[in-house]
Amino acid sequence: QVQLVESGGGLVQPGGSLRLSCAASGSIFSINYMRWYRQAPGKQRELVAAVASGGSTNYADSVKGRFTISRDNAKNTVYLQMNSLKPEDTAVYYCNSEIWNHVGFKNYWGQGTQVTVSS
């Protein structure tokens, strides 16, 4: 089937940077949107950023100007460059992809990667 594997999370000081990666593998004909969500303790999961297959992007207001989403279609991989990190960015970050394969069109999720911003 399809797997999404995230990497790049960790502990960083306020003002620092991290780069998350999410690689999709398995039965894939094409990928439409690729997205990053996050969920902080006690809060609902929220959309952070999304990138369409053609490259257009959109961001949550809270991360505009600090985060950049990008994708490498040849590698079926989406990235999230996070700069000027704040303690309120602390959360588990999940990637999500709309994938077309032999079973049809479906949303797939990664397992999540922890990002902690603390001094």
Image: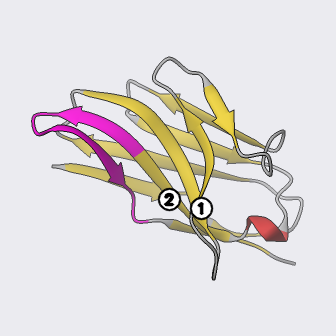
Q: Residues within 10 Å of mark 1 (few under 14, many from 20)?
A: many
Q: Give the residue type at disc 1.
A: Arg
Residue in the foreground of this view, choosing between 54 and 45: 45
Q: Quadrant of the C terminus?
A: bottom right
Measure the C-alpha gap from mark 1 to mark 2. Answer: 6 Å
Q: Position of residue 3 (x, y in %)?
A: 27, 52
Q: Position of residue 103 (x, y in %)?
A: 11, 39
Q: Would residue 27 be found to the left or right of residue 54 on screen?
A: left
Residue 19 counted in the magenta span? no
Residue at 35% across / 38% down in the picture?
A: 98
Q: Is residue 84 above or below residue 76?
A: below
Q: Would residue 103 be found to the left or right of residue 39 on screen?
A: left
Instruction: Please identify the quarter of the rendering in which residue 26 is found.
Output: top left
Q: Is residue 115 visible?
A: no
Residue in the foreground of this view, choosing between 19 and 53: 53
Please give the range of residues in magenta. Answer: 97-111
Q: Position of residue 82 (x, y in %)?
A: 73, 49
Q: Would residue 109 be found to the left or right of residue 100 on screen?
A: right
Residue that label 2 marks: 94
Residue at 39% across / 42% down in the picture?
A: 97
Q: Is residue 78 visible?
A: yes
Residue that label 1 marks: 38
Q: Is residue 9 above or below residue 30?
A: below
Marking on residue 72: none
Residue at 56% across / 41% down in the picture?
A: 79
Colour approach in the figure: secondary structure
- Residue lying farthest to the left in this orientation: 102
Instruction: Provide the major secondary structure of the magenta segment.
Output: strand
Circles 1 and 2: CB atoms closer than 8 Å? yes
